[in-house]
Image (cartoon, grey):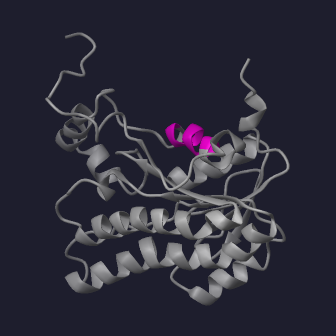
């Protein structure tokens, strides 16, 4: 019989960025349900029930360092915070720089702040939330695509650097998930349908769809997994020839 206790996070301490909403909130709540003590970082300073909220702007290096002084032990770090800025509201180069500063540089700053605690704990798991944008070209938002591709590369680089300390580094790559960030395309009938049909499973993802993969990557069940990017995308990136996803056809 398989040892399902390997998926338990009992006795472990986790920190999740972007924990106030969407994928970050779902993962934070899921890790807590699996037994972990969870801290949630967000600019708003809010987090799900059973998660200790810490206000922190990931664009502020000093704020990140201060946030980690509130954590005595750390076994799991989940970098779920991210932004996607609409076109036309800022200078295009500034839009690119701002996106990369939060979605890539801010993640690295968070990892550097967490590293001493993870090392002190004797090892642990870092999970970076990337995107199908890390391996596919999408129009209209080059900063977001570049940041997520860079984050996938950073994941592999740090997996090599931190293996000696027993710290595993992996990425969780969502497809189109119904969150505030995707609210515009989710509410637009044509865009919603186009994205739905592009998946093999014929539906958009929900934040809770990310929880199982996050628990796996955080837990001893994935003890021999590092430097990997796990796509949770309904089959988006694997899909080749267009196929019908309608159950009635």
x and y percentages locating residue 147 in the rendered image:
35, 70
Front residue of 238/198: it is: 238
x and y percentages locating residue 135 in the rendered image:
28, 54
Front residue of 103/177: it is: 103
- What's the residue at 58%, 87% (across, down)? 61
- The outermost residue toward the bottom is 62
Residue 91 in sight here: no
x and y percentages locating residue 209 in the rendered image:
50, 37
- Dominant secondary structure (helix, strand or loop) of the stretch shown in magenta: helix
Front residue of 66/8: it is: 8
- Report which quarter residue 101 is drawn in: bottom left
- The reply, left or right, for residue 240 in relation to residue 228 is left
- Report which quarter residue 56 is drawn in: bottom right
- Seen in the picture, residue 241 relative to 107 is either above or below; the reply is above
- Seen in the picture, residue 156 relative to 229 is either above or below; the reply is below
- The reply, left or right, for residue 87 in relation to residue 178 is left
Q: Is residue 211 magenta?
A: yes
The boundaries of the magenta stretch are 209-216
- The outermost residue toward the top is 248
On the rendered image, what quadrant is the N terminus found in? top right
x and y percentages locating residue 145 in the rendered image:
28, 64
Front residue of 71/224: it is: 224
Q: Is residue 31 magenta?
A: no
- The reply, left or right, for residue 25 in relation to residue 31 is left
- What's the residue at 37%, 40% (across, down)? 233
Residue 215 in sight here: yes
């Amino acid at each position: 019989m398989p040892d399902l206790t390997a998926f338990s996070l009992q006795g472990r301490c986790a920190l999740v960025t972007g924990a106030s909403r969407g994928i970050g909130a779902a993962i934070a709540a899921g890790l807590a349900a699996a037994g972990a003590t969870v801290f949630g970082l967000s600019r708003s300073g809010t987090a799900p029930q059973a998660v200790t909220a810490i206000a922190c702007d990931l664009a502020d290096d000093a704020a990140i360092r201060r946030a980690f002084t509130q954590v005595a032990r750390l076994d799991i770090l989940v970098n779920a915070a991210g932004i996607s800025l609409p076109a036309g509201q800022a200078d295009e180069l500034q839009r690119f720089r701002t996106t990369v500063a939060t979605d890539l540089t801010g993640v690295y700053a968070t990892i550097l702040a967490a590293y001493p605690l993870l090392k002190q704990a004797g090892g642990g798991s870092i999970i970076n939330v990337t995107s199908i944008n890390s391996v596919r070209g999408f129009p209209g938002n080059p900063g977001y695509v570049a940041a997520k591709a860079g984050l996938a590369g950073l994941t592999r680089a740090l997996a090599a650097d931190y293996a000696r300390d027993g710290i595993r580094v992996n990425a969780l790559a969502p497809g189109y998930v119904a969150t505030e960030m995707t609210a515009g395309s989710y509410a637009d009938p044509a865009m919603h349908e186009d994205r739905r049909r592009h998946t093999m499973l014929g539906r958009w993802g929900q934040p809770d769809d990310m929880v199982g993969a996050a628990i796996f990557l955080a837990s001893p069940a994935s003890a021999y997994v590092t430097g990997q990017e796990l796509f949770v995308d309904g089959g988006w990136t694997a899909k080749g020839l267009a196929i019908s996803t309608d159950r009635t056809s």
